[in-house]
Amino acid sequence: YSPVAAYENMVGAAVWQMSAECHGLMMQAFNIGKRNVDEMVAKAKAGTDGFKMENGKLFKDGKRVAVFSDIDDTLVDGVHYTANVVGKNGDWNNAAFARFVMSEGCTALPGAVEFVKYCVDNGIEFFYVTNRYDQGYKVGQKDSKGGYASWGTTNVESAAQVVVALCELGI
C-alpha cells in the first residue's frame, strides 16, 4: 500500500468524474435507459413479448417491471466530497461524508432525476439501494431557517431536494 498512489488515484477519479466527457457518458447512459423504457412500453402497447400495461403500471410476464439503482455516484454526485478531501490532503471518513450528503455540494448526477421520473411516469417501479445510514434520508419539514432538519441539524435545501424529489415520485 502506498499513500501517494492512493492519493493519486483519488485525484484521478475526482478529475475524471468532474469532466465534461464523464458527464456526457452519464447522460448517454440515462438516455439508453430511456430508450429501453420506450421499447418495453411499445411492447406493452402492442401486447408482445409478455409486456402489458395495467392501471398505469408496466408488467412483464405478470410481474412488475422495476429498476434497482445504487445512489452514490450513480444517481447522486459525491465527487465534490472527494475533491474536497484531495484539496485539503485529508482523509475520507463516514461522518464527514454524511455531512456532505446533506449539503449544497451533493446534487443529482446529470440526467438522473429525469431518468427516474421517466421510469416512474412509464409505469416502472424504481428502487434505490445504499449503505448510507438514516441521516442521509431523514428529511423533514422546512424549519424556521429555511432548511431541513435531520438528526437535530439544519441542512441546506439542495441535497434534501434530491431525496424529496425521489420521495415525491413515490420512489
Image: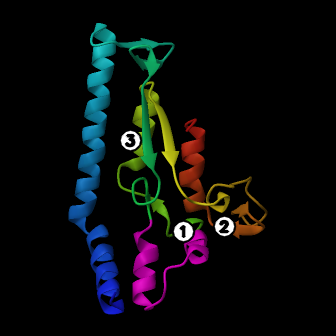
Camera-side residue: 146 or 77? 77
Q: Amino acid at mark 3?
A: Phe
Label disc, if present, on residue 104 of the rendered structure: 1
Q: Residue at x 53, y 53 (%)?
A: 162
The residue tagged 3 is 115
Residue 150 x, y percent position in the rendering: 72, 62
Do labels 1 and 2 touch, CB within 8 Å? no
Camera-side residue: 1 or 29? 1
Q: Horizontal placement of 121 versus 165: left or right? A: left
Q: Name the quadrant of the N terminus.
A: bottom left
Tell me the SS state at disc 2. Answer: strand
Q: Amino acid at mark 1?
A: Glu
Give the farthest residue toward the left: 21
Q: Earlier in the sequence, mark 3 or mark 2?
A: 3
Query: In this picture, is 159 found above or below 103?
Result: above
Tell me the SS state at disc 1. Answer: loop
Where does the magenta region start and end?
78-100
Q: CA distance from mark 3 to mark 2?
A: 26 Å
Look at the magenta stretch and give its main secondary structure.
helix
Q: How is the image coloured?
A: rainbow
Tell me the SS state at disc 3. Answer: helix
The residue tagged 2 is 155
Label disc, if present, on residue 36 of the rendered structure: none
> Badge 2, how many Cα within 10 Å: few under 14, some, many 20+?
many
